[in-house]
Image (cartoon, rainbow, N blue to C red):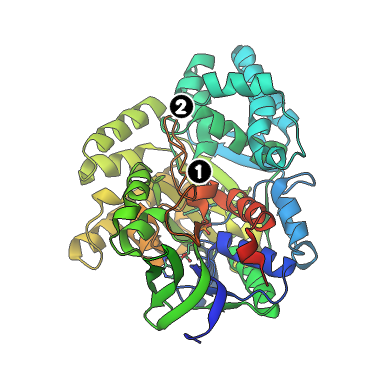
């Protein structure tokens, strides 16, 4: 296999790479595409692991596909990939249930969500109307950017200019502080920033609006079988069209002919694979650090990626229960456990960022004070077992090295802290836990090579310079395709891959 010349060889088989390869091989039957994956399963974050003794299936990331309403971008991607007939979608009537200091169901219909919030916070009417207007106008313009690039959507350009000037450069926290004086309402409305791996003080308000639009106006859904099934369906498509996905292969180097500054393939722990093009699904920060030989020509790109700030990593508590989670206070797919005191949580995070290796500060900030996301997977797909997953955004820098006694002790502490938080608000749940396991930011990094363990790619902060890594990259035949360049989540990663496949350079589509 190593001597064959492929049209495209891909470093990694995450959802961005799988989507691109499936779309391109459908357009060009016979195109020779090879995906090389270091892990034992395909999909990157779009995968699962099982605990057979507990009869449990744990999804590594997916609990919500945004843009799955009839008009949603991701629904159109699913249609174009021929996935619709093969999957069963699960729509939840509630976007999420808020719990903790405030108990409220946020409907997945924008009109009902607004009505519910107006009823719960009658004094905040003006701000709420303005917030929902921002989502409907500016969130929509951001959401339809690929449609716009392809001439299928004409936005209100005056609104776009206003948004670029006034909404892009402020954080979610600052924007909401201008509209609302109730800290709990601000925390509640800011919760979707978790979907892109950021806290309200980190995320650009304009980017956030488009994320809310994608989830609320374009509806979100889960699919039976979860993310691994999605990845496996795409692998089947690629293989059926002559492409290949090979597991347990670690790409060690991207081969470059220095005389022409053109990529010629990759070197792996199983030999070399020659190709006309190399697609990098791995983090560009990691790729520039690890996969290219030192070359002065790459200096500008190295500087560019050094300015990328990874979104937050995650610590995840996986639980198996001996009772239906719906009977224990988690009737909906998603529950957001709100910070008891949002301003104190923000201060704790600021203190931790100033001294990121300080374990006490970080544990207080991320585990004890900040809002947490709880997913009842049993409500989404009961075939995976009575599984509940608790996600806390986290920072790898305060975690000791893996396989050390300090690391093991910290995992225990993390598990206890999250269990204690959840147990305080859902006391019945504690008596029904039959299995618990915690993954740390290091776990995520180990299985995907993503920089700082970030599953959400780059942080889209108000001052974020767009990661124009593909623009004038000095090695011809190399391109980057992942959440790091597309934006966080399945919808962005898959949508961008479809867009790239539809505009693929002739070399990639030459067969
Ligand atoms: C806890 C969590 C929950 C999430 N929940 C959601 C959600 O509900 N909805 C949503 O839309 N998004 C969610 N996301 C985000 C979403 O999962 C990711 O944005 C998306 O899956 C990223 O896909 P990707 O293809 O860009 O990269 P990845 O999934 O990171 O794929 C990169 C692949 O490259 C491989 N690789 C790296 N280096 C090498 C090498 N040297 N050799 C070979 N292979 C290599 C990796 O093993 C990996 O398979 C979540 C993320 C996390 C962490």
* SS for dot 2: loop
Name which of mark 2 and mark 1 comes first in the sequence: 2
Q: Residues within 10 Å of mark 1 (few under 14, many from 20)?
A: many
Between 346 and 158, the one nearer to me in the picture? 158
Where's residue 94, x and y in %? 67, 41
**Circles 2 and 1: CB distance less than 8 Å?**
no
Between 420 and 314, the one nearer to me in the picture? 314
* SS for dot 1: helix
Between 452 and 468, the one nearer to me in the picture? 468
Would residue 197 appear left or right of 399 to someone viewing this image?
A: right
Q: Residue at x 57, y 56 (%)?
A: 62
Residue 118 seen anywhere in this rendered image of the structure: no
Q: Residue at x 46, y 79 (%)?
A: 273
Which residue position holds label 2?
A: 171
Establish if 100 lies above or below 422: above
Gap between marks 2 and 1 measured at Cα: 14 Å
In which image quadrant can residue 33 be found? bottom right
Establish if 494 lies above or below 57: above
Residue 401 seen anywhere in this rendered image of the structure: yes
Q: Residues within 10 Å of mark 2 (few under 14, many from 20)?
A: many
**Residue 279: which numbered mark, if any?**
none
Disc 2 beta carbon < 8 A from ligand 1? no
Number of on-image labels: 2
Establish if 116 lies above or below 231: above
Where's residue 246, x and y in %? 52, 79
Q: Residue at x 50, y 25 (%)?
A: 186
Would residue 439 appear left or right of 222 to someone viewing this image?
A: left
Which residue position holds label 1?
A: 196
Q: Residue at x 54, y 61 (%)?
A: 387
Where's residue 1, x and y in %? 51, 87
- Specify the quadrant that holds the C terminus: bottom right
């Amino acid at each position: 296999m190593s001597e064959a010349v492929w049209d495209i060889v891909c470093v990694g088989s995450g959802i961005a790479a799988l989507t691109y390869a499936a779309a391109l091989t459908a357009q060009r039957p016979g195109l020779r595409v090879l995906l090389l994956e270091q892990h034992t399963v395909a999909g990157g974050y779009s995968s699962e692991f099982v605990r057979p003794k507990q009869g449990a299936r744990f999804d590594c990331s997916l609990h919500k596909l945004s843009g799955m309403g009839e008009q949603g971008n991701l629904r159109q991607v699913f249609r174009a990939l021929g996935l619709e007939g093969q999957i069963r979608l699960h729509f939840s009537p509630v976007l999420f249930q808020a719990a903790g200091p405030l108990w409220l169901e946020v409907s997945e219909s924008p009109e009902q969500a607004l009505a519910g919030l107006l009823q719960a916070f009658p004094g905040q009417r003006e701000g709420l109307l303005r917030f929902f207007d921002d989502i409907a106008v500016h969130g929509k313009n951001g959401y339809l950017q690929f449609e716009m690039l392809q001439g299928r959507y004409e936005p209100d350009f005056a609104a776009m200019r206003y948004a670029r000037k006034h909404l892009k450069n402020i954080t979610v926290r600052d924007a909401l502080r201008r509209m609302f004086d109730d800290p709990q309402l601000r925390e509640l409305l800011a919760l979707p920033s978790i979907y892109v791996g950021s806290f309200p003080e980190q995320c650009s308000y304009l980017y956030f609006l488009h994320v809310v639009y994608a989830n609320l106006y374009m509806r979100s859904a889960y699919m039976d079988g979860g993310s691994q099934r999605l990845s496996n369906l795409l692998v089947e498509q690629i293989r059926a069209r002559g492409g290949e996905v090979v597991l347990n292969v670690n790409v060690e180097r991207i081969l470059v002919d220095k005389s022409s500054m053109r990529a010629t393939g990759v070197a792996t722990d199983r030999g070399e694979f020659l190709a006309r093009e190399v697609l990098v699904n791995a983090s560009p920060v990691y790729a520039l650090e690890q996969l290219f030989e030192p070359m002065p020509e790459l200096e500008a790109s190295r500087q560019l990626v050094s300015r990328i700030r990874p979104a937050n990593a995650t610590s995840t508590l996986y639980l198996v229960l001996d009772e239906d989670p719906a009977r224990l206070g988690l009737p909906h797919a998603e529950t957001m456990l709100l910070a008891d005191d949002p301003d104190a949580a923000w201060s704790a995070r600021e203190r931790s960022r100033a001294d990121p290796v300080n374990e006490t500060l970080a544990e207080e900030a991320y585990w004890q004070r900040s809002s947490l996301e709880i997913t009842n997977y049993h409500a989404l797909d009961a075939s995976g077992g009575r599984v509940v997953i608790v996600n806390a955004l986290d920072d790898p820098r305060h975690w000791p090295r893996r396989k050390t006694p300090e690391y093991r002790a910290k995992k225990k502490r993390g598990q206890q802290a999250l269990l204690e938080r959840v147990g305080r608000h859902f006391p019945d749940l504690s008596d029904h836990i039959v299995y618990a396991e915690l993954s740390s930011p290091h776990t995520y990094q180990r299985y995907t090579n993503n920089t700082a363990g970030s599953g959400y790619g780059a942080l889209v902060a108000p001052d974020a310079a767009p990661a124009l890594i593909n623009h004038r990259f000095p090695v011809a035949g190399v391109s980057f395709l992942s959440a790091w360049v597309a934006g966080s989540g399945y919808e962005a990663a898959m949508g961008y891959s479809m867009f790239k496949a539809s505009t693929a350079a002739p070399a990639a589509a030459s067969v």
